[in-house]
Amino acid sequence: QSETPEALRVVNLLQERNLLPPGTVTVPTPCLPQDLQKLNCSPEVFRCTLTSIPQTQALLNKAKLPLGLLLHPFKDLSQLPVVTSSNIVRCRSCRTYINPFVSFMDQRKWKCNLCYRVNDVPEEFMYNPVSRSYGTPHKRPEVQNATIEFIAPSEYMLRPPQPAVYLFILDVSHNAVETGYLDVVCQTLLENLDALPGDTRTKIGFITFDSTVHFYNLQEGLSQPQMLIVSDIEDVFIPTPDCLLVNLKEGKELVQDLLKSLPQMFCKTMETQSALGPALQSAFKLLSPTGGRMSVFQTQLPTVGAGALKPREEAAQKASAKDVQHLAPATDFYKKLALDCSGHQVAVDLFLLSAQYCDLSSLGCIARYSAGSVHYYPSYHKHHNPSQTERFLKDLKRYLTRKIGFEAVMRIRCTKGMSIHTFHGNFFVRSTDLLSLPNVNPDAGFAVQMSIDENLLDMQAVSFQAALLYTSSKGERRIRVHTLCLPVVNSLSDIFAGADVQAITCLLASMAVDRSVTASLSDARDALTNAAIDSLTSYRTSVLTIQQPGLLIPTCLRLFPLYILALLKHKAFRTGASAPLDERVFAMCQLKYQPLAYIMLMIHPALYRVDDMTDEGALNIEERTIPQPRVLQLSVEKLSRDAAFLMDNGTVMYLWIGRNCSPAFITQVLGVESYAAIPQNMTQLPELDTSESCRTRAFIDWLRERRPFYPTLHIIRDESQLKADFMQNMIEDRTESALSYYEFLLHLQQQHP
Ligand SMILES: [Zn+2]
């Protein structure tokens, strides 16, 4: 028993109730020799659900855990080795890039770690540009870094690198004008025109639409932008194609004029219709010669022309409480258009700002199959909903200024014997392992499911390599390569010992989204529960040597049932307290598209007590002291009336103030006299010159800085309307329609034989 690794130490979930670690959950380290592990890819970029790979599919089936990879391939990195080499060294047989996990037979030959072919080391590779020495090919940067970027020579392009092209498509119906979103878009764009990624070739254009489609001629020499209206939405054509997308540098003044006047142009509009489909068709025609990025801002259900949609939500609500209807798209119009876009290197990003049902399950297809992204601001209104406005503004700034890659493809290779059978994320699958990405952005996550087709006998380790080929905003063709190496094992206990509970949870979440859409929500929920039951049963019957009563689980999976319960109560999969249909669909989009770190926060929010934070254990970053309060379990048992708690669920933060919270905290952090004086709908902390205020703000700012989107903050007390939302996240507690954590554990125990 003394030889049992910590990951396999047995935990009885029914007895041990405080299993949540006080800080971040540790990522398992692959069990590799130290010199190899030192070179391995960062888990922030590349992670596997099982850090020890089963030798056979039979063994994998027996473990009842899903095998898959999670990737954040274009993540912003503080350090990235860039190699400029005329000759990129790749395996002649499987085209794998030379990497830290190949083996050198001698100075002149290397063996591919994916297909085992022996390749020659080219003469240039013998020279090491870093150490400026000759004859040490194993010291080259390509073999010393699991993440690396190559500047690609001309054979990596089918045509000259495209310039950055940005097209903005703006809903200007009465409803859209009423929300006031145009001000924010135009103002933010004005402020960031020079920060848009690109060079002297960057192009920009604008389309607005209501029941008709409006183009803007921005040709050099005009004294002001010229609006061209196409009212025949059944057959949209492009008036003067050359003047609608203009060089940003040359046409900047006209663009600025347009952005300044746009918010006022439609303020008296009586147009209530929305011809989104025809607007998108026009935009596609405009962008298809070059490719680029389409940013679509929509505030209501499209009502006229191709792609018009019908309200379906009511029927969905009336359906049985156990299942939700209309999770699948109502039409394939948006998917088809997205595939056309994808074929012409055009990606579509959708910003939905709406108080009403917009049928996101249909609209979302436009982004999903074109490698775009969906951003959703329910009940957006400039005056009535200031926190959404703030969030939209911050998100938009990030969106406009973050880096971008155009005309990209990503291929994920695995060692011979393994294969990928399902992909999750926003893209178009062009061939079995090639994803087409008209745009690639640094905030996109991907997941894949794998199987073992041939037994991995006699293999010590296997590798996975993701290669992302793209055109940078400066017109360079680049290849970013990540390589992950993992050991192969042949016993169930070793497989369990290497299980990565967060990666497993995120992969299951993506699988459950697919299941909800193709089968039903109840099927998806059952599959989630069964994943927990089956793996626990497998562990108990095949790994445990001592039988004892209780719900036994290895330490590395101790949070698995908790995360599964959290998923069952997540907005995407919950029953009972039903979420509006679009919000549910958006939650599903997020689970498919966000990188692991943010999905985990959305599934299992972090709860902290913040009225007694100290500098003990605090971080010091750039002369700021950032307190690090411990993470608490999501149960009302952890709350206290005389304290204050911050809950961070990724996109929203709640600061809950207890009724008897110390007056010092209320005055020195909230800046109000008493509990009763805390205003309803308070969404900002005042900048007070007190140490409590500094500490609280430093902590919240730090949390916000660590993600690319901006979470809103809601300060709530017992009487607040939002209290119910806050309490919904207390996933360990029982609700009218859902089990408590303890009840769920008992349920799992009864289910497994
Ligand atoms: Zn090879």
Image (cartoon, grey):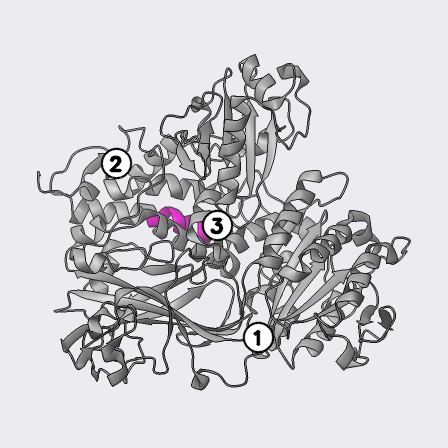
Q: With respect to residue 155, does 615 lie above or below?
A: above
- Asked if residue 526 is among those painted magenta in the image, a careful observer would answer yes
Residue picked out by circle 3: 522
What range is drawn magenta here? 522-531
Q: Pinpoint residue 632: horizontal percent, then vertical percent.
A: 40, 29
Q: Pinpoint residue 148: horizontal percent, then vertical percent.
A: 36, 67
Q: Between 126 and 360, which is closer to the camera in this rendering?
A: 126
Q: Is residue 19 left or right of residue 215?
A: left
Disc 1, disc 2: CB below 8 Å? no
Residue at point 32%, 80% (across, down): 95
How many residues crowd mark 2 within 10 Å: few (<14), some (14–19), many (20+)?
Answer: many
Which numbered disc flags the more N-terminal residue, 1 or 2?
A: 1
Residue at point 44%, 32% (across, down): 625
Q: Pinpoint residue 334: horizontal percent, then vertical percent.
A: 64, 68
Q: Quadrant of the C terminus?
A: top left
Q: Nearer the viewer, mark 3 or mark 2?
A: 2
Q: Nearer the viewer, mark 1 or mark 3?
A: 1
Q: Is residue 428 left or right of residue 287?
A: left
Q: In terms of secondary structure, where does tag 1 sit?
A: helix
Going by the numbered disc 2, the residue's amino acid type is: Leu
Q: In terms of secondary structure, where does tag 3 sit?
A: helix
Q: Which label sits on residue 430?
A: none
Residue picked out by circle 1: 342
Residue 306 visible in the current orientation:
no
How many residues crowd mark 3 within 10 Å: few (<14), some (14–19), many (20+)?
Answer: some
Q: Nearer the viewer, mark 1 or mark 2?
A: 1
Which numbered disc flags the more N-terminal residue, 1 or 3?
A: 1
How many residues crowd mark 1 within 10 Å: few (<14), some (14–19), many (20+)?
Answer: many
Disc 1, disc 3: CB below 8 Å? no
Going by the numbered disc 3, the residue's amino acid type is: Ser
Residue picked out by circle 2: 551
Q: Between 194 and 211, which is closer to the camera in this rendering?
A: 194
